Image: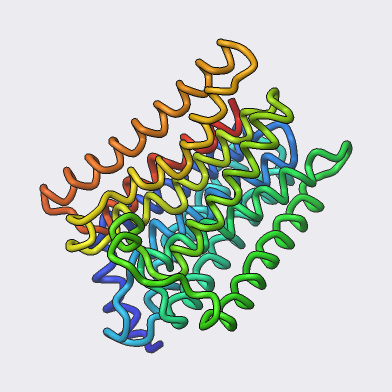
């Protein structure tokens, strides 16, 4: 990319609220990780991974394809906004002496690497023909797999940040490898196109694959965390919140106008993730457990209503779909982290 073309990109992107919101969110995430990091290494790495993927998707949005140069240039110049914010915020935090320098640098490095990996994942999805919705959801799901691997590694006593970061990398690569294999065999695995599927899930083939994976993981989570080990019900809440943020938010905010009129992706995802809670509440071992599950089900429903109204309100006042995506993800990130770190 020539310097002149890069200047054109920057002049366009500096007028996008999503660019500034992504940078501000990245700076806030680093400030939190530097000043008051989570006590456990696995949680620190997981939080950095989730934050990196979210701010990258916020900044990248839905770049023009084939306009003013290749899409790779658009994606990387947009990803530079949160990257620059991370570098500046880390330098300020370490200089202020608010945290141990090593912990701060590890968290910032993980966040920066995740932003870069997310940018490359978006480019690969776009070149593979994924819809804008799926190109935003896929790296968020990859970050969820990486964060889960980091948390799992952190459960081992005495494990530090570096092994947890390595586990997160393995989780990310496993997801990307499985997705690459699926894409090669996609002709035999495609879900049939139907108006009902498009209306419920405003996505392409990859998005409907994600819906199938979400259904499977929700079923597994219900059996393991809501029935077999009922004390671990908080993990199902985290699973549902992560899926909602990774899939429902992009599908609701980036959906084309005709799809937005035909269906409500937020309601569809709340239903998909909420039905195990209905079953678990009906078979709960105690009234208190039943009430807890009903309360979280109500939270899912409230999140779907809030996301739908937020998107409609922003669109009504003239905001772009990229702005709606950035605002919704900025609201979803602290909610998911709050569930992970009560």
Residue at the extreme right of the image, as rendered: 158
Decide: is 13 above or below 281: below
Decide: is 131 above or below 322: below
Taking the spot 54% from the left edge, 37% from the top edge, the residue there is: 337
Taking the spot 58% from the left edge, 25% from the top edge, the residue there is: 342
Taking the spot 58% from the left edge, 83% from the top edge, the residue there is: 184
Q: Position of residue 171 (x, y in %)?
A: 70, 59
Can you tell which quarter of the image residue 113 is in?
A: bottom right
Of residues 156 and 137, the one drawn nearer to the viewer in this rendering:
137
- Here the colouring is rainbow
Q: Report the quarter where the N terminus lies.
A: bottom left
Whether residue 97 appears in this view of the structure is: no
Q: Position of residue 231 (x, y in %)?
A: 70, 23
Q: Position of residue 159 (x, y in %)?
A: 85, 43
Of residues 43 and 226, the one drawn nearer to the viewer in this rendering:
226
Of residues 208 and 10, the one drawn nearer to the viewer in this rendering:
208
Q: Is 304 situated left or right of 144 in this image?
A: left
Q: Position of residue 116 (x, y in %)?
A: 55, 67
Decide: is 286 above or below 304: above
Q: Is 33 situated left or right of 210 in this image?
A: right
Of residues 91 and 247, the one drawn nearer to the viewer in this rendering:
247
Can you tell which quarter of the image residue 19 is in?
A: bottom left
Q: Is 157 situated left or right of 115 in this image?
A: right
Taking the spot 36% from the left edge, 71% from the top edge, the residue there is: 193
Q: How many marks?
A: 0
């Amino acid at each position: 990319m020539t310097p002149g073309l890069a200047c054109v990109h920057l002049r366009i992107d500096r007028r996008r609220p999503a660019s500034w919101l992504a940078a501000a969110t990245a700076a806030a995430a680093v400030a939190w990780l530097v000043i008051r990091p989570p006590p456990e290494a696995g949680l620190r790495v997981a939080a950095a991974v989730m934050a990196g993927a979210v701010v990258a998707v916020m900044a990248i949005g839905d770049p023009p394809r084939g306009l003013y140069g290749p899409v790779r240039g658009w994606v990387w110049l947009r990803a530079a906004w949160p990257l620059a914010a991370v570098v500046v915020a880390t330098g300020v935090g370490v200089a202020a002496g608010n945290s141990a320098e090593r912990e701060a640098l590890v968290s910032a490095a993980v966040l920066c690497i995740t932003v870069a990996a997310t940018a490359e994942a978006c480019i690969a999805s776009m070149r593979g023909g994924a819809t804008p919705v799926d190109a935003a959801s896929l790296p968020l799901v990859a970050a969820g797999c990486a964060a889960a691997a980091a948390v799992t590694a952190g459960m081992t006593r005495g494990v530090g940040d570096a092994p947890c970061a390595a586990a997160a990398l393995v989780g990310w690569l496993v997801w990307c490898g499985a997705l690459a294999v699926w894409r090669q065999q996609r002709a035999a695995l495609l879900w049939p196109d139907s108006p009902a599927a498009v209306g419920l899930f405003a996505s392409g083939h990859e998005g409907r694959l994600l819906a199938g994976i979400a259904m499977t993981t929700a079923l597994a989570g219900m059996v393991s965390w809501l029935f077999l080990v009922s004390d671990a019900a908080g993990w199902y809440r985290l699973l549902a919140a992560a899926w909602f943020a990774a899939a429902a938010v992009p599908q609701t905010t980036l959906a084309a106008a005709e799809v937005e009129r035909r269906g409500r992706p937020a309601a569809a995802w709340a239903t998909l993730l909420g039905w195990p809670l209905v079953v678990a509440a009906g078979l709960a071992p105690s009234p208190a457990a039943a009430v807890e599950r009903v309360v979280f089900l109500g939270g899912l429903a409230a999140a779907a209503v809030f996301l739908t109204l937020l998107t409609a309100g922003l669109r009504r006042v003239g905001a772009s779909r990229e702005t709606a995506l950035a605002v919704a993800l900025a609201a979803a990130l602290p909610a998911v982290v709050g569930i992970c770190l009560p």
